[in-house]
Amino acid sequence: MSAATADTIARPSATKVCPRSGPALEVLGVKAKAKIKKEAAEDAARVLKATFRLRAPIDPIAIAQEFGIEVLQGELDRDTLGGLVMDPGEEPKIYMNQLDLLVRRRLTCAMELGFYIRLSATTNKYGRVDLRSNRSKSEADPVSVYAEEFAACLLLPDNDVQVMTELGADELEIALRFQVSRELVQLRLSDLGLRTVDPLDA
């Protein structure tokens, strides 16, 4: 990634966000959030089947590339997780911060792919920069809720997580197998109503 490109993606002021049709949801209700998360989970399952990426660890970069998305990484500002840029006539681009650990870059790529899946049906011009300092605001944004759920379901498919828990794998073992953070595993287990075996209880 060139210095100019990295500088552009790292600066929120350079981000262009196309307006979406319909009113924005200022407060995302529980039912609305549940519906969005269900759609994201279903879309993630469809993407996995369509791309034949059903073995762990799932490779979000390879999946993005199958969609014709160019995946780039470079040294971005420490507050910048990554970004997505779509311009008419050009390949969409996902940016990742190479200063982040592998598990964070994998999650960033999966999330940006989620943004692409959600938005590409309605627009071909879009840009966003994801900042660590703005993560707390994402719960009120329907598109962010979708992207986060999509990423979690893509990287930790329901059936695979279910099988591992039935085999007695704990959170750390699942995290290592799927190359994700332990926190993401905990969130998925909670969403799926599962718990891993505590070694002290075995």
Image: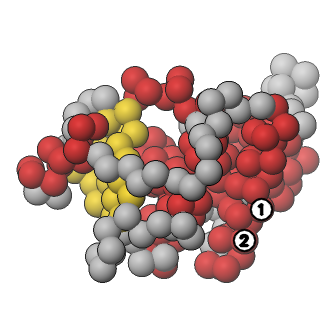
In this rendering, position of residue 33 left or right of residue 144: right
Q: Position of residue 195 (x, y in %)?
A: 86, 33
Q: Depth check: 70 or 58 in front? A: 70
In this rendering, position of residue 141 left or right of residue 31: left
In this rendering, position of residue 126 left or right of residue 9: right
Q: Amino acid at mark 2?
A: Arg
Q: Amino acid at mark 1?
A: Glu
Task: Find disc 2 in the rendering and name its residue.
Answer: 46
Task: Find disc 1 in the rendering and name its residue.
Answer: 42
**Separation (CA) of disc 2 from disc 1:** 6 Å
Q: Which mark is residue 113?
A: none
Q: Depth check: 103 or 22 in front? A: 22
Q: Position of residue 29 (x, y in %)?
A: 77, 31
Q: Depth check: 87 or 200 in front? A: 87
Residue drawn at 45 percent across, 41 percent down? 104
Residue drawn at 71 percent across, 64 percent down? 43
Q: Position of residue 33 (x, y in %)?
A: 75, 39
Q: Residues within 10 Å of mark 1 (few under 14, many from 20)?
A: some
Residue 189 seen in render: no
